[in-house]
Each structure stands twice: as C-alpha cells, then as structure tokens.
Image (cartoon, rainbow, N blue to C red):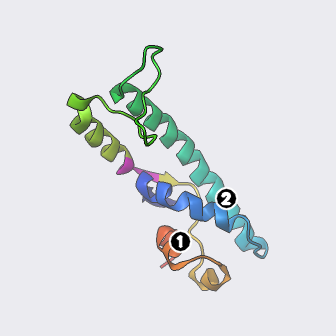
C-alpha cells in the first residue's frame, strides 16, 4: 500500500501516462500497470468530487450551466471564493491509500522522464 495525497496523484498522472507508453520487462511492467490503474481509479473519484465542488460554488448561466470567463476559467461566486478555495484545498490534501507496491529504486534508470517528471513521481519509488 502506498499512502499519498490526492494532490500527489493529480501532479503525477500525466507522467504516468508518458511512462505507460514506454517498454519495461515483465515484473516491472506489471507493477507500473497496476500502480497506474490504481491512480486512475483515484483520479476518477477526485474528478467527481471536484465537479461537485465546482458545481456548488460556480456562477451559472441561464441554463444552469457553469459559467466561464474569457480565458476559459470557471467563474466562482465572488462572495464564496474563500469557501471554494478551502474546500478544494482540503480535497487536494486528502490522503488516500493506493493498493499497489512502490516501484523498485534499482529500476529508476529504466524510466525515460525529465527531472520535473521524476519529481512528480518520486513518492512512488521505494526509498
């Protein structure tokens, strides 16, 4: 089991999508696939909760749809921005347990990722 915050998962999911396109030998490929599958499950749950929070705090148009500004950002009800930020931050800080093993540190050279991508996934490696 791996204990991480939802923020860690949000920050790592793009890197795992890159990694999933790379080739690895048997057991490492299995461990990566299992970890990625579990992270995707948590992302689905996170996205559902995020949609609920956005729906609760956003401005709505005449059809009841979420309003966006000219830059494509969701418009939050002005007098509820602090509440929105608090609730969304609490969601990101939620710790979850991933039903997968950490990746072996001795395989770290098998990954073709940038230093920034490695920072995003370092918590998923054994120490």
Which residue occupies the extreme front position in the image?
70
Q: In terms of secondary structure, where does tag 1 sit?
A: helix
> Which residue, given by chain and number where applicable, does mark 1 sit on?
117
Check if residue 110 falls in the magenta segment.
no
Is any atom of residue 46 visible in this view? yes
**Relative to 53, 40 lies left or right:** right
Q: Nearer the viewer, residue 119 or 35?
A: 119
Eye-nearest disc, 2 or 1: 1
Can the viewer see residue 123 in this picture?
no
Residue 22 percent across, percent down from the top left: 73, 71
Q: Is-magenta flag for residue 95?
A: yes
Residue 11 in the image: state x and y as whole percent. 48, 59
Q: Which mark is residue 65?
A: none
Q: Position of residue 75 (x, y in %)?
A: 36, 33
Residue 64 lies, in percent from the top left, at 45, 16
Crowd band around label 1 with a 10 angstrom C-alpha radius: few (<14), some (14–19), many (20+) = some
| Tally of numbered tags | 2
> Which comes before the other along the chain, label 2 or label 1?
2
Q: Please name the residue shown 58% across and 60% down the image.
A: 14
Q: Nearer the viewer, residue 33 or 59?
A: 59
Q: Does 67 sit left or right of 43 as displayed? A: left
Q: What residue sits right under mark 2 in the picture?
A: 34
For image coordinates 43% across by 43% down, the residue present is 71
Q: The residue tagged with tag 2: helix, strand or loop? A: helix
> Does residue 111 lie above or below 82 as drawn?
below
- Crowd tier of the residue under label 2, counting other residues whose Cα lies within 10 Å: few below 14, some 14–19, many 20 or above: some
Relative horizontal placement of residue 41, taking residue 55 as reference (left or right): right
Q: Residue at left 44%, top 37%? A: 50
Is 94 situated above or below 68? below
Near-viewer residue (63 or 19): 63
**Which residues fall within the magenta stretch?**
92-96
């Amino acid at each position: 089991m791996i204990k991480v915050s939802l923020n860690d998962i949000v920050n790592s999911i793009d890197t795992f999508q890159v990694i999933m396109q790379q080739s690895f030998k048997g057991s490492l490929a299995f461990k990566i696939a299992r970890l990625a599958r579990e992270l995707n499950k948590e992302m689905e749950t996170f996205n559902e909760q995020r949609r609920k929070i956005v729906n609760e705090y956003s401005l709505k148009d005449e059809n009841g749809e979420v309003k966006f500004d000219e830059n494509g950002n969701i418009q939050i009800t002005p007098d509820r921005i602090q509440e929105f930020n608090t609730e969304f931050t609490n969601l990101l800080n939620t710790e979850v347990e991933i039903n997968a093993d950490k990746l072996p540190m001795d395989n770290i050279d098998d990954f073709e990722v940038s230093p920034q991508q490695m920072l995003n996934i370092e918590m998923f490696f054994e120490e």
